[in-house]
Image (cartoon, rainbow, N blue to C red):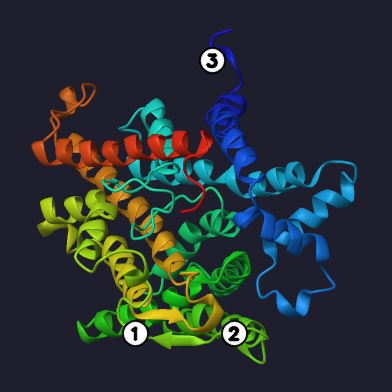
Amino acid sequence: MSTNKLPIAVQGLLPYIFLFVLSLVIFAPVIGVAAQLYVDFGNHIETAENLPHIVKRVSYVLYHATYRLIKSFLPTIHNPDIALLAIMVFILPLPMIIFSLSRKHSKGTISVYALLLLSVALTIVSPITFWINKTMIGYFNPIVYHNPTLIALRLFAISVSLLALKIFSNYSYQSANQRRYTLLLCASLLLCATQAKPSYTIVLIPGCCAFAVWRRLRGHRVDWKLLVLGICVPGSFMLGLQYLITYFNYADGSSISFGFLVFTRLWFPDWRVPVQLALSLAFPLTVYLLYFAEAKKHLYLNFSWTVFAVSAMASYCLYESGDRINHGNFLWNSYITVFVLMFASLQFLVQQYVRTKLAWPQDCRSRPPKISLKLSISFVLFGAHVFFGIGYYIRFMTGYVLLT
């Protein structure tokens, strides 16, 4: 049956059904492999199995609670299979969110098929890797298959960043109820993100504050109420509670310490730091440089870069002393902010394409516009990240990559 003969409501659902099925086909096999590994899935399965008895020692439990909820309905399923089902709860909606937002920005000028392809591609991008090893440490990797909590965090990061953007965008609320709803939604999603993994909240709070000061100094309005009550208060409260659970009077004696490149020097020489950073950011960095005149005016892109800059400073300057010195837990901050930055850069490119097409004469808009050299280079770099993401996927599936 031709799709144009289907009811309009069903036609509207078809892209989302397609994304659901495709995401299931792509991610179920690789997560099935990851769920068999002790690091990190095994640790989190063990934690989930022992909830709520060890809740006083676990600072973020959203994935583990999802695991326990599924197990309560399917008690006879093997633990790795429950772990797989639990993480698919967080994986499957993500491409749909990306597609919905991209479709909104495209204003009908980009085919649904192209948007579907971009939405799925964004979920598998990885750094351009010249040094291929079992760890990939040193790169900021937006997708890490072995860590369920980072995968869970990816579901919330984009939504939280877009809500936080309202702090700076001079957004006009239609009513007081809409303003209260936005504030409550922002705080709720931030708490969910922090309970998935605190990595994004740790850098979002100082990133929002720094960007707010910068915007105010330039004479722009800042929604201080949303900043304080939607971001700072709930985020700081949850992070403070997690800090007490993680470090206060804990048996291993670890603590947060400051030291430039202390962690990375355990793995590779200093000269590789800027090289691997550039390879992790090839696409967003190229987009910003090629479109500098337009990019420096783009609010979301600059906000995303600000939060990433905070995360990079945390990743390179903070580490855990004691028994956790080899864990590299502050790298997760940059992993998630690179993912948001990739999304922001892709949305920016979509908007540039739309602007180019709408600038054409009315009778020419049915034809695709001539792609500019800048746009071509940008999408080639995005394709390179997708290509290496496919390579990372294959290496993980074949057992070459054990950790990231």
Q: Residue beneath label 2, please?
A: 243
Q: Is residue 397 above or below residue 84?
A: above
Q: Residue beneath label 3, please?
A: 3
Residue located 29% across and 85% down the image: 213
How far is mark 1 from mark 2, CA to CA?
Answer: 19 Å
Q: Amino acid at mark 2?
A: Tyr
Q: Earlier in the sequence, mark 3 or mark 2?
A: 3
- x and y, in percent, of residue 320 in the image: 48, 80
Q: Amino acid at mark 1?
A: Gly
Total numbered labels: 3
- x and y, in percent, of residue 393 in the image: 46, 37
- x and y, in percent, of residue 92 in the image: 59, 41
- The nearer-to-camera label among 3 and 1 is 1
- The nearer-to-camera label among 1 and 2 is 1
Q: Looking at the picture, tell me which residue is in the foreground, 323 or 315.
A: 323
Sort mark 2 into few (<14), some (14-19) or many (20+) by Cα contacts within 10 Å.
some
Q: Is residue 317 above or below residue 288?
A: below
- x and y, in percent, of residue 295 in the image: 18, 58
Residue located 57% across and 12% down the image: 5
Sort mark 3 into few (<14), some (14-19) or many (20+) by Cα contacts within 10 Å.
few
Q: Earlier in the sequence, mark 1 or mark 2?
A: 2
Q: Residue beneath label 1, please?
A: 259
Q: Is residue 216 above or below residue 364?
A: below
Is residue 169 in view from this perspective? no
How far is mark 3 from mark 2, CA to CA?
Answer: 53 Å
